[in-house]
Image (cartoon, rainbow, N blue to C red):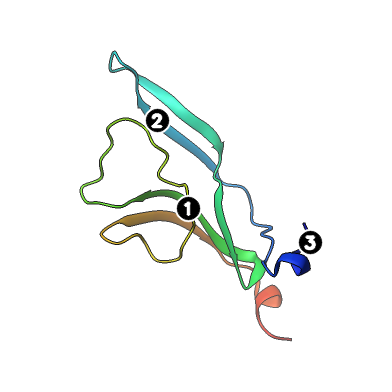
């Protein structure tokens, strides 16, 4: 869909690989997810934005079971009483500063 039609910036950020590990029923380490991160938000220009890798809504983090914590609406501040682990990508000045 065209950026102009939605009013949103279509990100052109580099994909960030996200590998999530866990444990099976016997307690052995396993890979739960191995894919590009899906929580991506462009800010201002397509090459400036954030990619969320992990977030929690409580401290200490509850790691029982597996429910992907990076779902739902992406917001800039962390969740109330929570934390965020994210990568911020900054564009070159020529892409970001007014001409």
Q: Secondary structure at mark 2?
A: strand
Circle 2/circle 3 CB separation < 8 Å: no
Question: Quadrant where the N terminus lies?
Answer: bottom right
Return the residue at label 3.
Answer: 2
Q: Please name the residue shown 40% across and 30% down the image.
A: 21
* Disc with the residue nearer the chain's start (2 vs 1): 2
Report the residue that reaches farthest toward the bottom: 99
Mark 3 or mark 1, earlier in chain: 3
- Tag 2: Cα neighbours inside 10 Å, few (<14), some, or many (≥20)? few
From the viewer's perspective, is 48 left or right of 26? right
Whole-number angstrom distance, CA of label 2 to CA of label 3: 36 Å
From the viewer's side, name the closer residue of 94 and 71.
71
- Work out which residue is located at the far top of the displayed protein and give it: 26
Residue 56 horizontal/vertical position (percent) = 32, 50
Q: Which residue is mark 1?
A: 52
Residue furthest left as drawn: 60
- Residue 21's disc is 2
Disc sitting over residue 75 in the figure: none
> Tag 3, which secondary structure?
loop
Q: Is residue 69 above or below residue 44?
A: above
Q: Position of residue 49 (x, y in %)?
A: 57, 63
Image height check: is 66 above or below 75?
A: above
Q: Residue drawn at (45%, 66%), measured in percent from left and top? A: 76
Which label lies toward us, 3 or 1? Answer: 3
- CA gap between label 2 and label 1 equals 16 Å
């Amino acid at each position: 869909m065209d950026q102009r039609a939605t009013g949103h910036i279509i990100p052109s950020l580099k994909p960030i690989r996200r590998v999530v590990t866990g444990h099976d029923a016997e307690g052995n380490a396993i890979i739960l997810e191995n894919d590009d991160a899906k929580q991506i938000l462009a800010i201002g220009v397509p090459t400036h934005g954030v990619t969320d890798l992990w977030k929690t809504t409580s401290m200490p983090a509850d790691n029982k079971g597996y429910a992907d914590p990076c779902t739902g609406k992406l917001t800039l501040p962390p969740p109330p009483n929570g934390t965020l682990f994210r990568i911020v990508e900054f564009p070159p000045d020529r892409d970001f500063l007014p001409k």
